[in-house]
Amino acid sequence: MSEAMQTGARPLERSADERLKKSTLLAEAMRRPELGAIAGLAAVIIFFAWRADASMFTLAGMMTVLAPASELGILAIAAALLMIGGEFDLSIGSMLAFSGLVLGVCLVVLDWPFELALAATFAVAAMMGIISGQTVIRTKLPSFIVTLAFLFILRGISLVGLKAATGGSTQLRGIADAASGSPLAGLFQGVAFPGTFRWLAEQGLIGRFPSGLPTVEGVPVSILWFTGFALLATWVLLKTRTGNWIFAAGGDQNAARNSGVPVNLVKTGLFVTTACAATLVAVIQVMNTGSTDALRGDQKEFEAIIAAVIGGCLLTGGYGSAIGAFFGAIIFGTVSIGLGYTRIDSDWFKVFLGGMLLLAVLFNNFIRKKVTGER
């Protein structure tokens, strides 16, 4: 009996060993959605290290690259979350102009305090996100169509609203001045840690002008928002039940509902997130430039989606990462600004966008087949 038990145990032990067999480090890396973005960023850096002026890789040059990348990155991370959840939002760019209109009217026309104007702007954005999400859910129309409609609706409201508020102009000025007395204004404009950078310049650790002032005054606040949002989104996706719900809602809605996932609530919340992310970028831009206009955010929805796709998001949903979108946005910033440090015509940037999108889709499709075993 003992030998029989031992004999019967051997196949079980072999079976257990097979189940517990660890995959290789390369196989694990290939499963990560952000792999393509990291590889792409490395290739871009190597290219510009070869072709660009050395000043691009100074501290000042890096801040010049990261500042626009951070604003796009906030949009890209929100777009990535929504794409993982199985939906698209093509109205992100128009929401930038619309939110700038709401903030500007509240501050300049209605003379509200900045705190109240800020709360009202985010409340209106959240409401628009709810309307978009519920329209998609209740009509069962593709989110591509619904948000494409809102792209034109919000852009048109921004144009008409600015003309009405200014007496015919499509630009509203004086916004930063109206908010200058608020203690919250510093969260959305200028740079952080100016004292630290002055000290670094005094110690000779960073460059400085003949006057003694540092060549870099501080870290643009948009970079801090970008980094914080990326960390928060990554934590939500990987460490919380909400993250599991997002992946489930984008992977298979019916299976997710049968498992108790509140799919409608998750998708509506993701639309609210994209609207509020666009509003955050709008506030940062408006507070730094002091004005808003009807063309603000033009085509940013496409750039945000491309950055998310480069970051590993599948167009079919259920797969992707916030960190991938983070690196995808940095690739955008590096190329768009980096071309100015070379002798290459900046118009090649559009060619780069199309090529990167095509390569990212092909690469992500290849990875998906490897992970799922699909032929």
Image: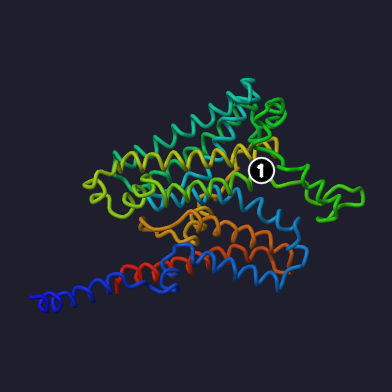
Residue 102 location in percent, x, y? 56, 30
- Closest to the observer, 351 or 44: 44
Please give the name of the residue rendered at 59% of the width and 62% of the height, measured from the top-left corner.
350
Pointer 1 local density, CA inside 10 Å: few below 14, some 14–19, many at least 20: many
Spot occupied by residue 41 in the image (x, y as percentages of width and height): 58, 66
For the C terminus, the image quarter is bottom left
Image point (60%, 43%), residue name: 295
Residue 66, compared with residue 45, is above or below; it is above
The residue that label 1 is drawn on is 221
Q: Please, what is the three-letter code of the amino acid marked with disc 1?
A: Val
Toward the viewer: 236 or 9?
9
Query: Nearest the camera: 306 or 237?
Result: 237
Q: Residue placed farthest to the front in the image?
A: 2
194 and 143: which is toward the camera: 194
Q: Is residue 46 above or below residue 277?
A: below
Q: Residue 287: give x, y in percent of width and height.
A: 67, 36
Q: Quadrant of residue 24?
A: bottom left
> Looking at the figure, which quarter contains the N terminus?
bottom left
